[in-house]
Image: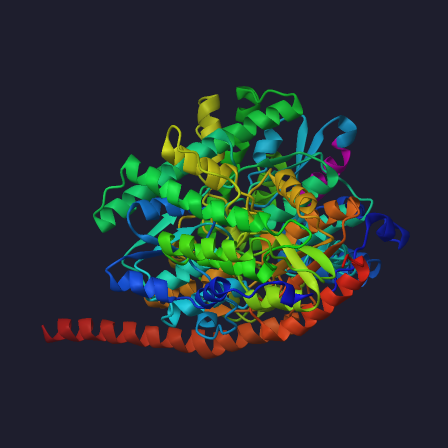
Amino acid sequence: MDVASVKVGSAMDAVNKVSEVVENDYVKKWKESGGKVLGYACVTTPPEIIDAAGILPYRIRALGNPNTEIADAHLARFNCSFCRSCLQLGLDGTYDFLDGFIETNGCDHLRGMFENWMYVKPADFFHYVKVPHLTTEDAMNYYVEELVFFKEAIEKHFGVEITDDKLKAAIARQEAIRDRLRQIYSMREGSSPSFTGAEALSLFLLASAVPYDDFIELADKAIAERTGTGVTGYRARLMLCGAATDELDLVRAIEDVGALVVTDALCYGARAFWSPVSTEGDLVKSLADTYLKDMLCPRMYEDFPRRRDFVLNEIKKADVDGVMVMHNKFCDVHGVDNVQLRLDLEKRDIPVLQLEKEYGSRADIGRIRTRVQAFLERIGGKS
Amino acid sequence: MSMTVLRKEDALARGFKQGLFDRVTGLFEIIEKLPDVMSDEEVEGLMSVLPADARASLEAMLIPRNREGSLAFMKMACKWLADAKTAPLEGKKSILVPFCFPPELVHCFDNSYPITSEVLSSLGVIALEGRGERYFEMALGLGLPDHICSANAVEVGSMLGSDDFQPQAIISAAVGSCDINSKTHELVANYHGIPLFVLEKPVENTERGREQYQKNFETLITDLEEFLGEELTEEKLRRTCERVNQGNTLMMELWDLHKAVPDPVPNLFALFTYGARYTMWGTEEAIKCVQTMIEISKRRLKEGAYPADREVARCLLTYTSYYFDLAGLFNWMEERGYTYLGDGLDLLFPGMIDTSSRESMIYGLATEAWNMPMTRQVGGHSMSMCWLEDALWASKDLGADCAIYSGHHSCKQTWSVASILRSELMNRAGIPMLSVQGDSWLKRTTPMSVIQKEIDEFIRNVVVPKRSDRRKVRRRAADRVEGGANAG
């Protein structure tokens, strides 16, 4: 891959610097000025509700942290290492800057992670948003009610009123953030993508870790810098699908051997921003439609065809040569869903590499590189 | 991890044609022909014609103290399997259900029949040579990860990789309480192109959660009526619900018998109790099976019968058990004086269904479903606290000295909060909990000898000394009262 063909701009360097740490300088500045920060982990949590309260929504991440020794005393080795890794950072004090937490029942591991976190280190504010696994009318009504409870809990604890105007403004802000991410992803679809996969992930991580104004400024600079530039010389265009993948080093390792990640269907990625939130009518219902009805996650049932079609559409849009479906060891929802996806894609003669990995494990990187190299040999790819 | 694909056609070419269901029903056709009462000589003769793994299981079940109860259970299982086999020939639709779903709802319909995934896996593990592991491998051959749940994967592997029985629909009732169970059933439905009916448990054990669950349950009934082309009438509901009530009354009686010291209920009956609950509840066969277990237990209570010289420790297993070596776990424990009071799957909380109207019966069935194991505990708002609440209640009600978490490695939800359960059982009730790492259905993961050693060391070095301390504390307290009275 011809890295030199991409201009190394200061904006992208700045983005990478911020994205590689949990408590970044922007968060520190926000806290120093008296701002509150609430942590959430799952894409079924609308950050708009937090934002509307004047609180910074922060998406919990582990950034490939391989250490889990404190967490392992609570969660078991049979729990996914992403959750163990996040719990570790919670219990070792890395996340002490958070003023509270939002739990969702994203998966069994995530539920266990929050229960242990709160058992060992209770937070002043903790709210559980119970998210249905279906999108029937009854389920949607239930979720709408859950979002109202969520809003009320924040209002009560933080002594703020979340008016419709505030919520509308927060939706507009989050929509602007999503719009930048859509633009960044679109700039990867051409034959000379403007961003590598690792850079796109870095920008995605930035979006849910810094205040709105700071993200817009950094993202706009990065977009401006990269407009008209492109990566060439790669061997194949890949799509990443699967479990929680916020590991910048992993994506870099995949791209180091000649692949270029041009799109994805990850929850730390494309699954989180394509669907817009309407500001017409009942705002909470609009949020529910986006964050549940439109959500693409294997935690949902009776919805596999929509997940598969999203992947097929992305393959076409981004001219993908092969798909990597990954899951972290012990992740059930992706471990099983990836099999369904692989079988469906293979029926359509789309090359697939199915990979189980240990989250954050540096020892796994060498093995993964070998598998990716072999996959690139198999699919040939363009140059 | 290697993801070699073993396609169905390859599996068939490699001689895996006969699936688990076919093989298990074949074996049970032999058992069906056995007399209700068997002499030692007849048992010995039967053993001589069985393959090794089936012989080991049947030997465990047919030792004198287990024999009558085991035969009652096996006869019930024979009927369940035989009816499942003939159901399609009679125009009925077979519906695959998980253990955490009340099969009586399916029994209510004339045109359908319930096949319980985990029970089929368990019967395969108990009865088949190789303990059904070849079917688990078929599931892995499809690319499924090795951390999927063998409780389902053994049976489902057979459905995916062999020319086995196929259900016409699947009810998925673990949504909200177990990801791997739900995802596995979703995959099978998509793979075979059959309908999947989802009964979601909202993750809150509140009135609001119960109301939502009721809506979900009623939607399921409407969907089933449409799928089966049959109305669920009041008459059909009443016929089954009355039998459910009979069964539930008996189950409570059996539970109470466990409270006696020493426990007169043979260890293995804990398994038979839920084996009946998960398959034939709402039928005469299940009632007969539980009645037999009660009669035996009452007789043993009267005789003061117990397999060891004394009851050393009363153990509550907090979740699943181990099913690949019945003699090695159930019989071994009670012969050492370790009573198996029951496990998490015995936490059934049976109630009485109001049979006065269609609505009341549907509400009652939904309540049964709501209270099913796993759904009730880890499907609650807090997995740890809802599980703890039930484990604490059962421990106290049955006078447990200790708890054992079998640590079935696929139960990610219980593993994720097992440390909290262990701490709180000790903090709140002084009950120590042993966590064993193993697979409940696959013998290859942790050998029974290792499990035995861990249980043995735990009871001898932790439970018994601790119980002695408690007794000393009680004695000192009693002495003080007595001394005070004398002084007075």
Residue sitting farthest toward the front: A228
Q: Residue at x 31, y 42 (%)?
A: A151
User: Toward the viewer: B424 or B198?
Assistant: B198
Question: Is A234 rendered above or below residue B486?
Answer: above
Question: Is A278 rendered above or below residue A83?
Answer: above
Q: Please, which colouring scheme is shown? A: rainbow
What span is in magenta?
A: B73-87
Residue sitting farthest toward the left: B488
| Residue B320 horizontal/vertical position (percent) | 56, 57
Q: Residue at x 33, y 73 (%)?
A: B470
| Residue B307 horizontal/vertical position (percent) | 57, 66
State whether residue A128 appears in this view: yes
User: Toward the viewer: A162 or B94?
Assistant: A162
Asked if the magenta segment contains residue A106, the reply would be no
Horizontal side of residue B430 vs B16, given as left or right: left
In the picture, the quarter occupied by the N terminus of chain A is bottom right
Magenta stretch: dominant secondary structure: helix
Horizontal side of residue A201 vs A371, given as left or right: left
Q: Quadrant of residue A207?
A: bottom left
Horizontal side of residue B475 vs B265, given as left or right: left
State whether residue B266 appears in this view: no
| Residue A219 horizontal/vertical position (percent) | 46, 55
Q: Quadrant of residue B82?
A: top right
| Residue A137 horizontal/vertical position (percent) | 48, 29
User: Toward the viewer: A137 or B412?
Assistant: A137
Asked if the magenta segment contains residue B79, the reply would be yes
Question: Is B335 rendered above or below residue B227?
Answer: below
Question: Is A122 rendered above or below residue B113?
Answer: below
In the picture, the quarter occupied by the C terminus of chain A is bottom right
Q: Quadrant of residue A357?
A: bottom right
